[in-house]
Image (spheres, rainbow, N blue to C red):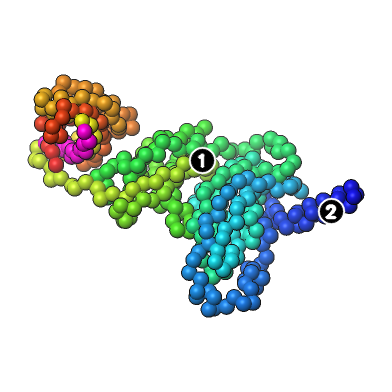
Amino acid sequence: MGAVGLTLGFLTLALFLAALAIGPTGRTALASVPAAHDVADAAVPAAYDAADAAADDAPPTRPGGLRPCPVPFAANPTGYASICWSASSDDTGVAGYDLYRLDPDGFVLASSTTGTVGGFSGELNRLYTMYVVARDLAGQLSPPSALITVPATLGMTPTSSPTPLPGDHVPPSKPTGLRDACLQDYPGVTFCWQPSSDNVAVTAYDVYRETATAYRRVGTVLPPSLNFAEPGLVVGQRYTYVVVAKDAAGNLSVPSDPLSALAREGLPSPTPSSGAPCTVTYRATTGGPRLDAELVVRNTGTAPVDGWTLTVDYPAAAAVRLVSGWSANWTQAGAGVAGVNKQWNKVIGVGSQTHVGFTATYGGGAPPSPVSFALNGKTCATG
């Protein structure tokens, strides 16, 4: 029995290895992928015809359970990035899966398979980000899976540290601190994040939005800016984004954690008062003794503001007391509050603006309204 079992074990391994096609470095490797015409011929049952296709109006479910799944071995020192996932379900049957890899110019189709294992050749020990989409017999696509990042390895054999290649191969750090509504006066989605670091320099941040069937690059932000805005979206609907940092050598960071951002109407554009060096748009929500204030500060003067202090004065009887704030260093200032710029929003160009806010308590009764605003001691118009 022992010899028989051993023979069966080797036979099973041989069959599994025969199902994997590992291409040379830099080329797509397909896992159990017949030619395109063979897929169409083999995947569609004889009973499946045009009438069945017309009746199939439900796409496959989103692939889930993505995890690293190294190939058993590699015949050469080429790395191989490989994952497994849980099968999707569909009312007429799943025909196959497409695996997309993140490159410097966006996501590209890396491989296709009829199973739930997929991967591609790559640079040994380099990190690769990917996602999977299921296809049904009618050609409908599932929502994209969650993103996963795995290294290219040698499978089940130990992965040694290869001789470093010349040039920069160190990716930037993962973008963190994504926060919705950094510019609430903007109609659409806005958000911001914390800067990534790199051994040389971060040259850009690519922003991807999840769509019904893919992750679409919708913008590129150049440092030092850390804000993104997308117009033309459905107000009141949430959209999911990730941010990827990259450097001049094309190295890509691990994507940020997903952010669910709300598309907003934006604040109305005020009519600036003539002669005022600044305009402040103020909006506050209250609950009990709590007041949450949002302010948009615009430079309506003739020169950039390089470093600023914003004072917000309330009636003394309102008993406003500062609790916390954001996008400025806030302190109590008599009957009101004062905010000093952060390093990243220190400069407000002519015609530009910055968005700040704070939370405070007040003495009860009707919510208080500020009596004045000042920027660097100069009174601002309101709008």
* Residue at left offset 69%, top offset 60%: 32
Residue found 14% across the figure and 42% down from its top: 383
The range drawn in magenta is 276-288
Amino acid type indicated by mark 2: Leu
Residue 8: numbered disc = 2
What residue is shown at x 66% (from left), y 62% (from top)?
33
Look at mark 1 in the image and give the residue it sits on: 253
Q: Disc 2 vs disc 1: which is toward the camera? A: 2
**In this rendering, is residue 347 above or below 180?**
above
Towards the viewer: 126 or 238? 238
Mark 2, other Cα within 10 Å: few <14 / some 14–19 / many ≥20: few
| Left or right: 382 in relation to 115 | left
Q: CA distance from mark 2 to mark 1?
A: 43 Å
Q: Amino acid at mark 1?
A: Ser
Task: Kindly indicate whether the residue at mark 1 contacts the one at mark 2 (C-beta within 8 angstroms).
Answer: no
In the rendering, at what x and y percent does residue 85 appear?
A: 60, 51
Where is residue 169, by image quadrant?
A: top right
Is residue 270 rendered magenta in the image? no
Mark 2 lies on a secondary structure that is helix
Residue 109 position within the rendered picture, expressed as x and y whole percent measured from the top left? 56, 57
User: What's the residue at 45%, 58% (across, down)?
Assistant: 212
Bin the neighbour count of mark 1 within 10 Å (Cα to Cα): few under 14, some 14-19, many 20 and up: many
Q: Quadrant of residue 157?
A: top right
